[in-house]
Image (cartoon, rainbow, N blue to C red):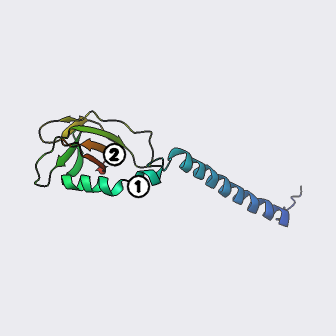
Amino acid sequence: MTTSERKLTGWHALAIFGGCFAVIISVNLVLAYSAVSTFPGLEVKNSYVASQGFDERRAEQEALGWTVAARATGGLLILSITDAEGRPVQAGTLDAVLGRATHVQDDRTPDFAFDGKAYVARESLQPGNWNIRMKATALDGSLFEQRVVLHVDG
């Protein structure tokens, strides 16, 4: 019984080389499609229109002197808004969307209630980075918008 040795020919090397590149290119295409399809990357529909009143809105918001901080503890999400003197602020209205920075599938609207010191909502958050995109209206009608970054430890 004889065994024949198989030789690595140029065609074999080309097939291996081409196969490796095909796998790399396929994986890159899948990852690129996944990145583009899961995150729209849009903050506003028309940036030119949104920029027209930016300076006035910023000045109005800065005049309020509000500072916002968020923390998650014991199944509660706490959003603290304080004025320039450090006193708690109760806004006229508060709308907030809680979600991840990288995708929208975890987005939800917490049911915040003001407890005299801060806005509190029952939210169980997984570890990682979260964003709270809030819009509040002061009692004088001034609009306050801010993205609050919240890091939840594991």
Work out whether residue 48 or residue 83 is closer to the camera in this orientation and state it: 48
Up/down of 69 relative to 111, above or below:
below
Pick the residue in front: 29 or 148: 148
Q: Is residue 45 above or below residue 108?
A: below
Please say if 4 is above or below 128: below
All told, the count of numbered labels is 2
Residue 134, position in %: x, y? 30, 44
Q: Helix, strand, or loop for circle 2? A: strand
Residue at horizontal 11 percent and vertical 38 percent from the top: 116
Residue type at tag 1: Ser
**Residue 6 appears left or right of 116:** right
> Which circle, 2 or 1, is nearer the viewer?
1
Residue identifier under label 2: 133
Which class describes the residues within 10 Å of circle 1: few (<14), some (14-19), or many (20+)? few
Mark 2 to mark 1: distance in Å? Answer: 18 Å
Determine the secondary structure under disc 1.
Answer: helix
The quadrant where residue 79 appears? top left
Residue that extends furthest to the bottom in the rendered view of this protein: 10
**10 Å neighbourhood of mark 2: few (<14), some, or many (≥20)?**
some
Residue type at mark 2 is Arg
Q: Quadrant of the N terminus?
A: bottom right
Residue receiving disc 1: 51
Q: Residue at x 30, y 38 (%)?
A: 95
Nearer to the camera, 31 or 84: 84
The location of residue 12, given as percent across then percent down, is 81, 61
Q: Position of residue 19 (x, y in %)?
A: 74, 57
Q: Which residue of the protein is positioned furthest toward the right in this rendering?
A: 1
